[in-house]
């Protein structure tokens, strides 16, 4: 894989993978001569960190620090990704929250059976928290972007969806909500591809060879007993109960998953907006009216009038929403059974009411996944 691909991958990966450490390992002397004015560690290719990690290349840079590709001399020269947190207190403190999640994942899934990225090691280097991970490839978003936003074939969607559902079900079973599911946080283990001639587009397109994925970014993951922030999730994948400030729990991840699968299927975002009222209007255009009981309980009464969304289709914004959104089933690309099964699952995932929304345990039993259930070794192949 080229440097440009890895850079794109880890640019989005950076802002999420923070560390948390025990006090004894956290205390280490800082060195102002090693830090840039913005708090980044100053390094060069060939430097060795922690007496074992030899820096090969810089993969990306983000709010919390940088990610570098390293040779791990403690693991027989394996190539790994090492995140180096800025030497600033607020980022180091934020790191303490995520490491708890990462350690819980390692403890509960030592065999890495649940498709979550695995933390390999962490340490402190002159005031910089560092964490190593398995070296992954492009995100499902970056691959789609590089492929001119062509959708994934439905067989590949099925396999990817099964893995992601398995990963998030595992989190829910361990009293965790991810809270930031999106295509950028789902990474291919290997993004090698084949060129396939696309008859409809009259040109070649890329087809991923191996749809094995890992779920990443546990920086916002929240245990059931912890404080729940009012606003969570990246806008386009945000559940209605979050927008309406009704409180949230595991079902908000299910809603996000429904949005992700639609995006894989169509090649574009289901809710392309940056405004709450418009977001709710799009939901109603796609899903029908928001239930009255949710409206009356909402702390966002300014979005409603007489129990209905305060929105007109005759305004410029209203005409825009009407042109961009249509009832969910009208997005079907085929009348084949597996397409209808997928949309049946999407309707269950995109139920307005969290308590009625399908769980991941039930979702994995849905007929859409039966081909993989009947033959677990069945993987999508290039046509």
Image: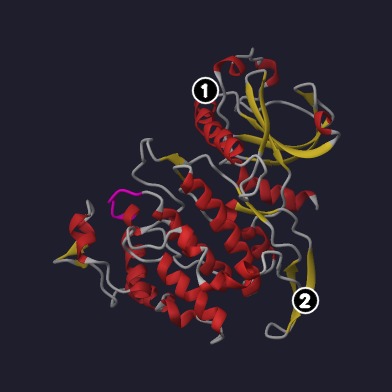
- Quarter of image, res 336: bottom right
Label ID, residue 142: none
- Quarter of image, res 132: top right
Residue 272 percent location from the top left of the image: 46, 65
**Is 102 drawn above or below residue 112 in the view shown?**
above
Write the residue at 69% across / 68% down: 147
Q: Which residue is mark 1?
A: 89
Q: Earlier in the sequence, mark 2 or mark 1?
A: 1
Asked whether residue 348 is drawn in magenta, I would say: no
Write the residue at 66% across / 14% down: 31
For the magenta stretch, what is the residue range? 243-248
Whether residue 236 is visible here, answered yes or no, is no
As drawn, which residue projects farthest toward the top? 29
Label 2 sits on a secondary structure element that is strand
Write the residue at 67% across / 43% down: 111
Q: Which residue is mark 2?
A: 196
Question: Label 2 neighbourhood size at 10 Å, few (<14), some (14-19), many (20+)?
Answer: few
Residue 67 percent location from the top left of the image: 69, 38
């Amino acid at each position: 894989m080229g440097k440009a691909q890895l850079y794109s991958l880890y640019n989005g990966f950076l802002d999420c993978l923070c560390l948390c450490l025990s006090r004894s390992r956290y205390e280490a002397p800082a060195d102002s001569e090693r830090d840039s004015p913005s708090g980044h560690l100053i390094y060069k290719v060939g430097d060795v960190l922690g007496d074992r990690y030899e820096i090969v290349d810089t993969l990306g840079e983000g709010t919390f620090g940088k990610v570098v590709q390293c040779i791990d001399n403690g693991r027989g020269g394996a190539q790994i990704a090492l995140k180096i947190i800025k030497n600033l207190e607020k980022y180091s403190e934020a790191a303490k929250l995520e490491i708890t999640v990462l350690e819980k994942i390692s403890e509960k899934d030592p065999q890495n059976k649940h498709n979550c990225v695995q933390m390999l090691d962490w340490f402190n280097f002159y005031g910089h928290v560092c964490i190593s991970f398995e070296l992954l490839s492009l995100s499902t978003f970056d691959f789609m972007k590089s492929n001119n936003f062509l959708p994934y074939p439905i067989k590949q969607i099925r396999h990817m969806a099964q893995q992601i559902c398995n990963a998030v079900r595992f989190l829910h079973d361990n009293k965790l909500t991810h809270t930031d599911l999106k295509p950028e946080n789902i990474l291919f283990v290997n993004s090698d591809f084949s060129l396939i001639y696309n008859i409809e587009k009259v040109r070649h397109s890329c087809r991923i060879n191996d749809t094995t994925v890992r779920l990443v970014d546990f920086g916002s993951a929240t245990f059931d007993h912890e404080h729940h922030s009012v606003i969570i999730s990246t806008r386009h994948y945000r559940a209605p109960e979050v927008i309406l400030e009704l409180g949230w729990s595991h079902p908000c991840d299910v809603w996000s998953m429904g949005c992700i699968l639609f995006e894989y299927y169509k090649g574009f975002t289901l809710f392309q907006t940056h405004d709450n009222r418009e977001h709710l209007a799009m939901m109603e255009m796609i899903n029908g009216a928001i239930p009255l009981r949710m409206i009356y309980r909402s702390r966002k009464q300014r979005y409603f009038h007489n129990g209905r969304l305060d929105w007109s289709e005759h305004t410029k914004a209203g005409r825009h929403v009407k042109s961009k959104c249509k009832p969910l089933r009208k997005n079907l690309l085929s009348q084949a059974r597996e397409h209808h099964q997928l949309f049946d699952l999407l309707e269950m995932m995109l139920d307005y009411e969290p308590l009625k929304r399908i769980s991941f345990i039930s979702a994995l039993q849905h007929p859409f996944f039966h081909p993989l259930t009947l033959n677990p070794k069945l993987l999508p192949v290039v046509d």
